[in-house]
Amino acid sequence: MKILIDERGKKYMPPKDEDFQTDLGIIKREKIEESSPGDELKTHLGRKFKVIEANINDFIELMERKSSIILPKDIGTVISYTGLGSGQRVLDAGTGSGSVALTLANIVGGTGKVYTYEIREDFATLARKNIKNSGMKNIILKNKDIKEGIEEKNLDLIFLDLPRSWEIIEDAKNALKDGGWLVFYNPYIEPVKIIHEKAKKCGFKEVKTVEVITREIEIKKKGTRPRTRMIGHTGYLTFTRKI
């Protein structure tokens, strides 16, 4: 999938069936279709756009969404901490716009599989559209309430971003393989203590909660320092492992 980047560094996902139009001018659809990554295209106003091959992060940044998404700093921590890799089988609930499912699918690759549950029909419809447009073939989306039961077994990872997620700890344990991970995402701290208590009672090990905060460093001629604005709190990640 190709995306365009303008002179200001702004990214665009050009439409498939019509000309590309911005405040910097118009580029004919045919010119975009004939272009290759690395090419430079000009609008009818002479403004330049660079063509690049989109990766999964580019696609997620530009795709349509109806809800907030889990940021790379958080899902990246999940991937690295659990050792997720090629060929593994994972489950994600709730799907939302599909960002987590897409990121996990990119990691497990064509030999792996991602199962994602979404109770809301409107979210499931949008996520299905985003998954199709991404080109990912290893995602199975289910428009159903995961609290009605998990159908999959021998999973390497289950990632839960939903209210009262501790209610399915037993089902999640039964769906995981030995050594598999159950990870909870919560925007508020109150559920974390409940999850710790329930997880330990259920026999999970390596139970811990972390918060990931990133600070970008600002480089200027007069000096170097952290940016005044930063991505602070987004959510708490609680890791548990079936051993």
Image (tube, rainbow, N blue to C red):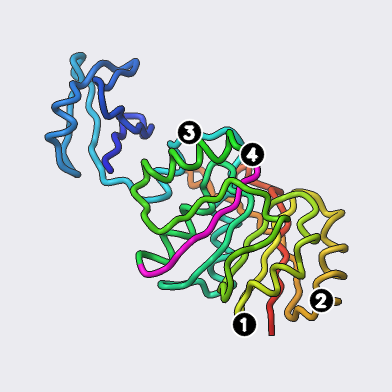
- Among the 4 quarters of the image, the one containing residue 20: top left
Within 10 Å of the Cα at label 1, are there few (<14), some (14-19), or many (20+) other Cα atoms?
some
Cα–Cα span, label 4 and label 3: 16 Å
The residue depicted at 87 percent of the width and 54 percent of the height is 190
Closer to the chain start, of discs 4 and 1, is 4
Contact flag, marks 4 and 1 (Cβ < 8 Å): no
Residue at (73%, 79%) from the top-left corner? Answer: 206
Provide the residue designation for mark 4: 120
Which mark is first along the chain, 1 or 2? 1
179 lies above or below 221: below
| Distance from the alpha carbon under mark 4 to that under mark 1 | 31 Å
Q: Which residue is nearer to you in this view: 147 or 241?
A: 147
Q: Amino acid at mark 3?
A: Glu
Residue that mark 1 sits on: 179
Q: Is residue 178 above or below residue 136?
A: below
> Is residue 103 in the magenta section?
no
Tell which tag, 2 or 4, sits nearer the viewer: 4
Number of numbered discs: 4
Which image quarter: residue 243? bottom right
Cα distance, mark 3 to mark 2? 38 Å
The numbered mark, 3 or 2, whose residue comes first in the sequence reads 3
- Position of 49 with respect to 185 (left or right) is left
For residue 116, above or below residue 127: below
Q: What secondary structure is marked by label 1?
A: strand
